[in-house]
């Protein structure tokens, strides 16, 4: 009786598998001629199929049990293959939804920047939050000329000690002062930009298994770093005024996080600058709960009237991250961390481990631009240019609901009811305009809003920005079903 029942169940399962396979025309790897462990053969075949686009970005893979049945192997083997493919960044799993081929576009953990050149033809790129081009170039030419005539060159070509770099540290102090952080020279750690600063901070201060909190919508390369470092992540709720301190307090009580990464000024994507009150509340919670705040303030130099950094409110619990990328030039790769004395040895050690020292030559360029006031002037120029583009956007998007800061580089546009963000992004792309969908900023797919981020600063030519915005507005006004027509 029991055996008959088991036979019946097996029949049913096989019947369902066959039905699924017939219905879905599922992907099956070609393992002919491959050697080595079966699970690695599957991963190799998968990588080849992704490269040849037989498996396209975002494609859903069959459940591993179905694939196992199809290949006549154990489900453990296919499960191991999928696990390995996730590790190799070929696939990503979404709880309750399945396993998908990674897409570098909308996948927040892909963390790989695409082509950053500023084209004057082809698609209009409103997807990159970079400073407007051109302002820094003449100053950098001038400074390079000065350096080329200077007797400091041999020293810049050598390994440096922290003592040798004292005028670079002094430049860091001036830069941090400009960010409203009254910095002590001995608490400054030079980095190769904000991204490097963030990675060094996570590597220095967190261990595999530690919990890192982020905002619900965030700068997702940090989530990719967390994944690589074996950290757990959880998100803190946001409302129209940014991250919600009560939710931070609640998570601290419940989950004992080690650190909270946040972007309080000109937040990407929401554009919000966190109020003074919320900053204070977050600082107090971090002190009470002994949580490290990683305050990513790379956009702060663009905003004139901003509240004091959290680093000033909870100085013993905050690592402040800044860089010259958004106000001067991202290609310089210069940034600074400012941290309490107790965290400095670990931070310095990870900078040493990762790059030994920040390149003295680019640091020298940056230090001269900072010390003679050029860098601060360039930040103001970016701010003014951003204001002009924001006002252009405001006039074109007059009857569209969106969030923006007059001095920010980007807009955040919640889409009308019938639009899905992925469809809208695809429609924009098919009409020659590139934007980011909400999913790009959401560590958890369930939090991805039906909204897009539109950046105004990457394109050098303002008429292209205008054209891009007009295309976008025309699309938003159409129901999705009509959006495929020529505009
Ligand atoms: C919020 C945020 N943090 C950090 C970075 C990295 O900055 P950097 O170019 O200085 O590495 C970026 C770059 O886009 C960013 O948007």
Image (cartoon, rainbow, N blue to C red):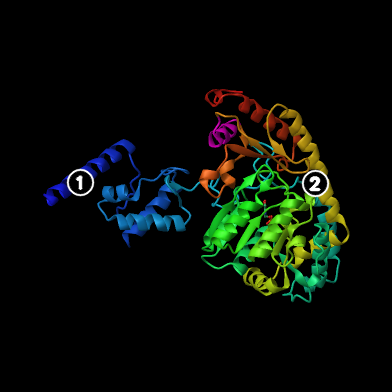
In the picture, measured across the screen, residue 442 lies left or right of residue 302, that is left
- Relative to 88, does residue 118 appear above or below in the rendering? above
Look at the image and say whether residue 420 sits in the magenta stretch. Answer: yes
* Residue 124 screen position, x and y as percent: 66, 36
In the picture, measured across the screen, residue 469 lies left or right of residue 155, that is left
Q: Is residue 342 visible?
A: yes
Which residue lies under the disc numbered 1? 9
- Relative to 191, does residue 394 appear above or below in the rendering? above
* Displayed-image quarter of ligand 1: bottom right
Q: Residue 382 bears which disc, if any? A: 2
For label 2, the SS is: helix
Say which quadrant the C terminus sits in.
top right
* Residue 70 screen position, x and y as percent: 27, 47
In the picture, measured across the screen, residue 331 lies left or right of residue 423, that is right
Q: Quadrant of residue 183?
A: bottom right
Magenta region: which residues? 419-431
Q: Nearer the viewer, residue 340 or 421?
A: 340
Q: Earlier in the sequence, mark 2 or mark 1?
A: 1
């Amino acid at each position: 009786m029991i055996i008959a029942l088991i036979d019946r169940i097996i029949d049913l399962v096989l019947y369902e598998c066959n039905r699924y396979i017939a219905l879905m025309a599922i992907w099956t790897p070609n393992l002919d001629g491959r050697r080595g462990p079966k699970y690695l053969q599957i991963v190799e075949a998968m990588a080849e199929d992704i490269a040849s686009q037989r498996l396209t970005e975002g494609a859903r893979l069959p459940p591993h049990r179905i694939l196992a049945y199809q290949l006549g192997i154990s489900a453990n083997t296919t499960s191991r293959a999928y696990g390995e493919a996730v590790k190799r960044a070929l696939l990503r799993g979404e709880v309750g939804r399945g396993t998908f081929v990674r897409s570098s576009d909308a996948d927040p953990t892909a963390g790989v920047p695409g082509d950053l050149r500023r084209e004057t033809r082809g698609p209009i790129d409103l997807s990159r939050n970079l400073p407007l081009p051109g302002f820094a170039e003449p100053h950098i030419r001038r400074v390079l000329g000065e350096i080329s005539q200077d007797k400091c060159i041999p020293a810049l070509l050598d390994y440096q000690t922290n003592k040798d770099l004292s005028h670079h540290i002094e430049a860091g102090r001036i830069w941090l002062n400009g960010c409203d952080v009254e910095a002590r020279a001995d608490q400054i750690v030079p980095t190769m930009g904000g991204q490097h600063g963030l990675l060094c901070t996570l590597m220095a201060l967190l261990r595999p298994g530690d919990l890192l909190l982020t905002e619900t919508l965030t700068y997702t390369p940090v989530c990719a770093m967390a994944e690589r470092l074996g950290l757990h992540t959880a998100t803190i709720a946001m409302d129209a005024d940014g991250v919600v301190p009560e939710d931070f307090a609640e998570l601290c009580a419940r989950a004992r996080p080690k650190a909270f990464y946040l972007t309080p000024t000109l937040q990407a994507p929401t554009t919000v600058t966190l109020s003074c009150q919320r900053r204070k509340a977050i600082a107090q919670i971090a002190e009470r709960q002994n949580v490290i705040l990683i305050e990513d303030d790379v956009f702060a130099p663009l905003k004139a009237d901003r509240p004091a950094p959290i680093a000033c409110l909870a100085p013993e619990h905050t690592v402040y991250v800044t860089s010259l990328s958004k106000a001067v030039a991202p290609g310089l790769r210069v940034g600074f961390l400012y941290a309490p004395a107790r965290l400095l040895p670990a931070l310095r050690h990870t900078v040493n481990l990762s790059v030994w020292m920040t390149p003295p030559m680019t640091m020298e360029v940056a230090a001269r631009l900072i010390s003679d006031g050029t860098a601060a002037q360039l930040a103001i120029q970016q701010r003014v240019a951003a204001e002009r583009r924001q006002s252009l956007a405001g006039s074109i998007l007059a009857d569209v609901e969106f969030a923006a800061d007059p001095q920010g580089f980007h807009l955040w546009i919640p889409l009308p009811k019938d639009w899905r963000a992925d469809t809208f992004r695809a429609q924009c792309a098919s009409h020659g305009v590139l934007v980011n969908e909400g999913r790009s900023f959401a560590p958890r797919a369930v939090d991805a809003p039906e909204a897009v981020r539109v950046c105004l600063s990457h394109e050098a030519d303002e008429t292209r920005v205008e054209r891009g915005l007009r295309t976008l507005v025309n699309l938003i006004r159409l129901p999705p079903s009509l959006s495929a027509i020529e505009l």
